[in-house]
Image (tube, rainbow, N blue to C red):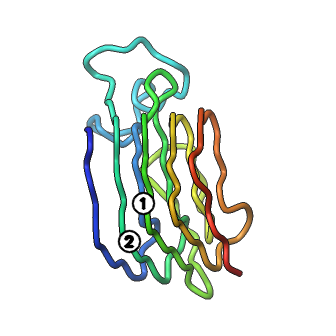
Amino acid sequence: MDNVIFRNIKMENVKTPFVANSFYFCDPDGRTEYVQNRSPLPVDERIPYINRLVFENVDCTDCHAAAAFFIGLPERKINEIVMRNVSVSFAKEPVPFVPAMLCGVDEMAGKGILAENVHTPVLDNVSLSGQSGQPCELYNVDCVKGDVTVCR
């Protein structure tokens, strides 16, 4: 995938409004060792590639699990995720939920932006309201551009 743009969207009462998941359940049961392996594997034609995703002018209200959940592969990171003019507010009592179809991820409620194995998240005029904990949890991320405004 490259240069996929989501623009001018309003969402209400969603679990996790933004998800990009390279470990998506894609084989017959989605849980084989090959699909769910978190160690770097050789890059071949089976390895997904996400170059650039853009989320622009998006308003999300009454969210539950997390504002965003982005996870690339260790051997092929998601290159760039752009979030521009994005607002996420959480429900007063968010319901715990697993944020993406991925083994080994626990239910969560009210989390901010979670990104793992992403080269460059670009956060331009992103605001979170009502989330618990850190606004961003980043693992194996090379460069973050911009920042997030947090409103309590």
- The reply, left or right, for residue 9 in relation to residue 107 is left
For the residue pair 74 and 82, the one nearer the viewer reads as: 82
Above or below, comparing residue 60 to residue 2 in the picture: below
Q: Looking at the picture, tell me which residue is in the foreground, 133 or 142.
A: 142
Question: Which corner quadrant of the image does residue 28 belong to?
Answer: top left
* Residue 110, percent from left and from top: 62, 71
Which circle, 2 or 1, is nearer the viewer? 2
Name the residue nearer the viewer: 23 or 126.
Answer: 126
Disc nearer the start of the sequence (2/1): 1
Label 1: which secondary element: strand
Left or right of 23? Residue 69 is right
Residue sitting at 44 percent across and 58 percent down?
83
**Identity of the residue drawn at 31% across and 14% down:** 44
Instruction: Decide: is 108 above or below 38.
Output: below
Residue 58 percent coordinates (x, y): 38, 71
Question: Left or right: where does residue 119 sit relative to residue 58?
Answer: right
Q: Which of the labelled discs sits on residue 18, or is there none? A: 1
Looking at the image, residue 1 lies above or below residue 149: above
Mark 2 and mark 1: span between their CA atoms?
A: 10 Å
Side of 90 relative to 45 (left or right): right
| Residue carrying label 2 | 58
Type of amino acid at the residue the image marks with label 2: Val
Amino acid type, label 1: Phe
Q: Quadrant of residue 147?
A: bottom right
Q: Is disc 2 placed on a helix, strand or loop? A: strand
Residues at discs 2 and 1 in contact (Cβ within 8 Å): yes
Tell me the residue at 45%/54% (across/down): 100
Determine the residue located farthest toward the bottom in the rendered image: 92
Outermost residue on the right side: it is 133
